[in-house]
């Protein structure tokens, strides 16, 4: 903002004072001439024309060493005459004060009243944390500049509040996503524990199988630990950075099979693979997180069967999960990957975050999420960029 010179308050006030001085001077002249004429009229009306020296008396003001001689016939008339002659001494200051007061009142109403009211109203609203308004002041003086500064402050506070609420909502969303994603690994671990509790006491599990199950459980625990650390360091879901490491596509296929069987429980699970090469660079934990969300989502809608296709081709990994349920509605096809979306009334255990998390994580890994229907139900495909070693 540039400096306001020609329309500053001091120069504006000077423009009001000049007419005030002129009017005041005119009034003083009128009062002076008026009292003089009144004084002459009163003297001529009450003096004795035959003998101006008759009934002559003298009034003396010894305090001011002022001597006044009058041709008036009575002392009362002389006092009235004296009051008229001295009226201008009283009226002139009163008139001057009146002119200054009126000028100040006009100046306040025109130049100060609205900006001050605007600032007071704005200050009250800001103190009550009501920031959704606009401060407008058309005065091009210091108060106008002050109103503009208040508006800048309001906008800054409003934007900061919006950012704060956005951050809080994002943190809530991240926490909800974190809670949502913890359920699936815990379900897998619970499945392993139930398996061991059912078969180990009867000696139906070989040592090799037991060690294999324990290894799988240990892998889930390690993945949970890494995922927890990653989520704790992320300020929001979009801040997650994939930890790209060399990994075997065959081992990933085995993990997909084991996890799929455990999560599908009593529903039929089928996995088909197409691997053009084995060694790839990926964030296996992130890929598994997406996969588990897709399987959990399919289990919720499937009637009897879930099919998974896993392929590694070129620079992309594709994991397609389909079910034999009712498929996606038209609304769900457009909104299923948005946070907290649900096209049906479900229990509080479902937050509508699964496909949203999958989409974000796929995009963070250089891929994308595709939602569609096939002839027998819903189909979701997760793609990941996978650099060949």
Image: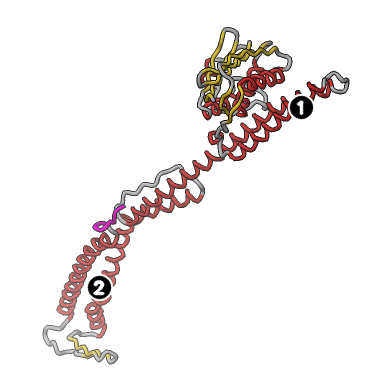
Q: Quadrant of residue 234?
A: top right
Q: CA distance from mark 2 to mark 1?
A: 108 Å
Q: Residue at x 67, y 22 (%)?
A: 255
Q: Is 271 drawn above or below residue 10 in the view shown?
A: above
Horizontal and vertical percent position of residue 73: 20, 85
Q: Is residue 305 visible?
A: yes
Mark 2 nearby-residue class (10 Å; few <14, some 14–19, many ≥20): some
Magenta span of residues: 1-7
Tell which circle, 2 or 1, labels the residue nearer the N-terminal end: 2
- Helix, strand or loop at disc 1? helix
In the figure, is residue 377 to the left or right of 38? right
Q: Residue at x 63, y 33 (%)?
A: 178
Which quarter shows the C terminus?
A: top right
In the figure, is residue 323 to the left or right of 26? right
- Nearest the viewer among 299 and 223 is 223
Residue tagged 1: 214
- Nearest the viewer among 259 and 58 is 259
- Helix, strand or loop at disc 2? helix
Q: Which mark is residue 92?
A: 2
């Amino acid at each position: 903002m540039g400096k306001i010179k020609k329309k500053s308050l001091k120069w504006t006030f000077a423009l009001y004072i000049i007419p005030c001085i002129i009017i005041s001077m005119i009034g003083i002249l009128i009062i002076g001439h008026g009292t003089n004429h009144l004084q002459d009229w009163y003297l001529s009306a009450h003096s004795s024309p035959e003998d101006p020296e008759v009934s002559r008396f003298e009034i003396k003001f010894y305090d001011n060493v002022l001597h006044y001689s009058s041709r008036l016939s009575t002392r009362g008339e002389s006092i009235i005459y004296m009051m008229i002659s001295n009226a201008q001494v009283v009226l002139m200051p009163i008139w001057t004060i009146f002119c200054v007061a009126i000028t100040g009142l006009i100046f306040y109403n025109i130049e100060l009243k609205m900006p001050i009211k605007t600032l007071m109203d704005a200050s009250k609203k800001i103190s009550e944390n009501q920031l959704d308004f606009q401060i407008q002041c058309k005065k091009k003086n210091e108060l106008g500049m002050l109103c503009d500064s208040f508006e800048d402050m309001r906008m800054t506070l409003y934007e900061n509040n919006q950012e704060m609420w956005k951050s809080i909502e994002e943190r809530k969303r991240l926490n909800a996503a974190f809670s949502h994603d913890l359920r699936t690994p815990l379900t897998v671990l619970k499945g392993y524990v139930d398996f061991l509790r059912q078969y180990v006491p009867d000696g139906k599990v070989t040592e090799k199988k037991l060690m294999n199950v324990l290894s799988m459980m240990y892998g889930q625990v390690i993945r949970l630990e890494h995922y927890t650390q990653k989520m704790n360091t992320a300020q929001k879901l979009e801040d997650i950075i994939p930890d790209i490491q060399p990994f075997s596509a065959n081992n990933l296929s085995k993990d997909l099979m084991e996890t799929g069987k455990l999560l599908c429980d009593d529903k039929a699970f089928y996995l088909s693979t197409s691997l053009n090469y084995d060694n790839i660079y990926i964030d296996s934990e992130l890929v598994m997180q997406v996969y588990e969300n897709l399987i959990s989502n399919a289990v919720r809608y499937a009637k009897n069967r879930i099919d998974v296709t896993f392929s590694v081709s070129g620079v992309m990994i594709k994991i397609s999960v389909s079910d034999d349920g009712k498929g996606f509605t038209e609304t769900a096809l457009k909104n299923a990957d948005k946070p907290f979306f649900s096209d049906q009334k479900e229990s509080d255990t479902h937050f509508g975050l699964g496909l949203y998390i999958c989409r974000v994580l796929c995009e963070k890994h250089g891929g994308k999420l595709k939602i569609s229907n096939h002839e027998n139900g819903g189909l979701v495909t997760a793609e990941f960029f996978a650099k060949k070693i």
